[in-house]
Image: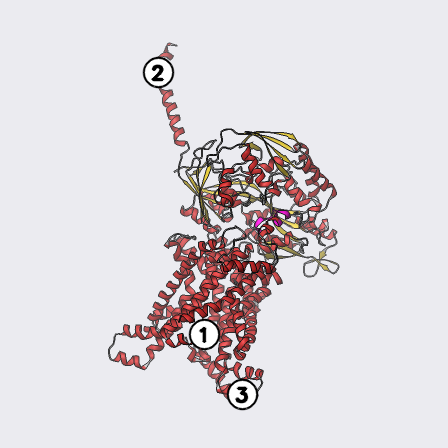
Amino acid sequence: MGSTAGARMRSDVWRRFRKNRLALVGLLSVGLLVLAAVLAPVLAPADPGQQDLPAKRTAPGRQFLLGADEFGRDILSRIIFGTRVALMVGTVSVGIALGLGLVFGMLSGYLGGIMDASVSRAMEILLAFPYLLLAIAVVSALGPGVLNTTLAVGIWATPAFTRIIRASVLTLRDTEYVQAARALGVSTSAILSRHILRNFLPTIIVYSTLYMANAILVEAALSFLGLGVQPPTPSWGLMVATGRDFLLVAPHIATIPGLAIMFAVLGFNLLGDGLRDALDPRLRT
Amino acid sequence: MGGWRKGAPYVLAAALVLAAGGLWQDVQAGEKRGGTLTIVRPTDPVSLDSNLETTAPGAWVYYNITEPLIVLDEQGKLQPRLATSWQVLSPTKVRFKLRPNVKFHDGTPFNASAVKFTVDRAFNEKPGARWASLAGPFAGAEVVDDLTVDLSTKEPYGPALRSLAMAYVGIVSPAAVKKHGENYGRNPVGTGPFTFVEWRTNTSITIERNNDYWGDKALIDRAVFKVVPEEGARMISLRTGEADMVIIPSPSQLPALKREGQVNVYEVVGGRIIFVGFNLAKPIVDDVLVRQAMSHAVNVNTILENIYEGAAVRPRGYLAPTVFGFKDMGLDKLYPYDKAMAKALFAKAGWTPGPDGILQKGSQKMTLSWLASRGRYLKDAEMAEAVQAQLKEVGVDARIQFLEWGAVFSQMRSANLDHHMYTFGWITTNNDADYTMFSSFLCKNAPPTGWNRARYCNPKVDELIEKARRSVDQAAREKMYAEAQSLMAKEPIWIPVANTKEVVVTQRFVRGFSVHPVEYNLDLSKVWLDK
Amino acid sequence: MAFFVLRRLLLAIPVVLGVIFCVMLTIEMIPGDPVTLMLGEHATREAVEQVRHALGLDRPLLVRYVQYLGKLVRGDLGRSIREGRQVSQELADVWPATLELTLAALVIAVLAGVGAGIISAVWPNSPFDALARVGSLFGLSMPIFWTGLSLIVVFSLWLQWLPVGGTGSLRHLILPATTLSLPSMAMVARMTRSSVLEVLREDYIRTARAKGVGEVLVVLKHGLRNAFIPIVTLLGLQFGQLLGGAVLTETVFAWPGLGRLIVRAIFARDYILLQGAILVFSLAFVVVNLLVDLSYAAIDPRVGRQG
């Protein structure tokens, strides 16, 4: 693409994006999260691991702005530091899924035949495989912790990405454009990267953003079921899980982290929607 | 005298009225029969055949259906049940005199043959009882006459009697076992105050009063055990009236419940101790000074107050108080919470705080790895997190690895434990010190052979444990265990944090219930409903 | 048509067999074995070995896999390791509960979602529309277990209108079904809104309106027909999400369904029970995908012919 044409398209996209108020809200939210993650030590009023047992379950108020958890730790500080885990899980796991999805999706979509059949069957097997078992297997092999849980989440998201990419490749594979390139003797990898990939870049961007939201939810669910982040690292999902026991006496312990999860997920959803609308208004849902 | 005689009729009348009034009071305050008791607890058992089901959910039910020969009362003393008396004939043989005129729920008579059948089924047949190895080296039973039976062990075994008082050793009806075969676990038949009615898997088990019971008949008509896995949900069902009794209630709600006085809270110090253990095979913690220092760094009282919130008491040793052979190890006096003392001991061992606050010795940092479970024992994960923070304050960097139970358990059982510390909860199932001492502290019983997770080796302690196991002189045994525990207290091998209470919460109208220190012994025979 | 169905079912077989083998292999590789876990902390090594041998669990993996397949062909799903009950019986005990929950959630999602979507499309940018759109966004963003817990706090603890968990009556079903339906409801509402809006903008609609044909009929006939395929596709995809979400919902509400069974089986390493459950699960997927495709064929006959 020529640079002027590209520049014009980019400013068009930005213009459309700017007009969409909800999309801006999404961008702002995600920006806020990133800021919180980066500046956590500065923003947090207290050490997220600092316990004060006699002050357990304090309701939100003067001493603790958002209240204290069952160990007397400041919930606000834990929420702020928790953005690090949420964002890391979101981005890295989507990165893994995207990487694997690109490889498998493009190969199976473009080459077809046995490759396609086997990849498709493999993805179906992965989809039917109980996710919890997958997570336990990864954690057992590699040990618990954020990074390895992220890997498990990434593997979980792979079939969906593979499917999307494969579908996109299929629609573009038999166009005249690509056929001409093939006739001209352009190599497979060049065709894949230059001609095909570029055309569904918007879909990838949108899908990745939306999936980040899902990834955060899955990590939260894993922590909820007992795997995932190791204390004292704060994870929003783990906070909801452990706060469950105190719903009657101190509902804020479980509720507030849940709101944080929702905020992050909402932000990514809005951003993804906005990107999709801006990049291709025809795709608007 | 004359005056007295004149007033006699009035006095008599008055006395009669008073007596009648007293009687009337008695009837009012007397126990009422009838009603259904609804009990909620976390899980369903796997079977009601004690040979196959050795966990609490099963025992809570079959403790009311089958009965052992002898039982442990709430003070930890042996009491007759299906046996009226017993006599130690030799170090390997005990003779039991059985209670006459007792029938099983299916009408067949209870006698020495039934006892022999049960014992053989547990110890001598394949597959045998899953608790057989816990009970000890039993050889079998011999029928002497219809109401007399001899139980023998393969070698002298001190804890023999206490083993026979376990909830698992209920005598079963031979006729019923033969009739149902492998389905016996879903149709248990015993001699107890309740008979089995029905079992809807993962939903409820129903038992009803045995009107032909040999002893005091139960007062309630039926008891229904329901499955409610969520702690919060169990408590709510109590509030809404859906449940009458909650087993394993929510500790955080207990103080409020006790204050409000709307329900009955029954609690007693139980047999389970939750502790932080050391792995003496690993460097750093193999140094006794380090372990002593860490014992001083843990503030057990604040954990009990704020995390267990009254659901547990401070352990007085490695054994629970009702266990035979228990000695108060005085751990709270030996290792009071004292951060300065902890730091001093670390210094003595060569560990001083580095620039980041973590202790170091030369180039080595005190980074310890800790294996823990979540939700397996009461507040196990929370306790670990709290202790982790306390250790951080004195410069110990304890890295906890929480895994789901399957993974934790398999690591605990394997020959190699790659962690310095671990969390565990232990109950002395037959309430005899041998059970824990032999499996957990004997040098040769390191995993996978036994349960010496600490890999503790002390020849003097070994000698005491072996001798106490083979002696049937109970007084001598007590002395040997006391000595062993004194030696172990100085090591220290575990940091016991919580001795959990058995807590059961009931509606106000549930009367006659008392909770047994042994978790498995849930006795419903005296319960009545005041409504 | 029959050929189409048959071919689809046959294609599912290798996948299911593959999953079964993967499950078996995975359980073999992760730490923790079912018998040790079952017998608990107080069992001796001899006891464990004895039970493993009795259950045939000490034989090599491939041998066990082949034996399992052999039984499977005869319709025997084996016995669960933990309880020794027939797996088919255990599954029969739980799958109706999950089916009930999932169908209820689906019904709620469709009725509320389509309803809200239609209203939004007919009166775009109205307060209702704004509320519905924001609501949908929230519905998509709320973690299911958090929603469930919050609903419990509000409706069971504070208001005491509905029971906390468990099963047994319609009242027990309301909270879990609603919780599970929310993400799907949100997606359906959005999908319906955009599909109906798209149709309403078309010229021929304007002509019909100008002619005075009732607005309602217009919307119902054309708008819904246009929305049908995307909604059905969405629901087909959502069914997978629903079944997956059932695990979390069942955990929060103590709903005795397939999801909880699977969690239990995984933690107990009971691979025989797990495999049976996965079998049911994957077959459910296949059936649903098939139904979705069949419904396309009903709308568009070309689909059926190409198979």
Q: How far across and how far down the image is residue B184, in percent?
A: 50, 43
- In this rendered view, identify the residue nearer to me: B357 or A285: A285
Q: Nearer the viewer, mark 2 or mark 1?
A: 1
| Separation of marks 2 and 1 at Cα, in angstroms | 99 Å
What residue did someone put label 1 on? Answer: A273
Range covered by the magenta-colored residues? C37-49
| Separation of marks 1 and 3 at Cα, in angstroms | 33 Å
What's the amino acid at mark 2? Pro
Give the mark count.
3
> First in sequence: mark 1 or mark 3?
3
Q: How far across and how far down the image is residue B307, in percent?
A: 55, 50
- Marking on residue A181: 3
What residue did someone put label 2 on? Answer: B9
Q: In which quadrant is the C terminus of chain C drawn?
A: bottom left
- From what the image shows, is residue B51 above or below residue B383? above
Q: Is label 1 in contact with label 3 (beta carbons under 8 Å)?
A: no
Q: Nearer the viewer, mark 1 or mark 3?
A: 3
Q: Are the numbered discs 1 and 3 placed on the same chain, yes or no?
A: yes
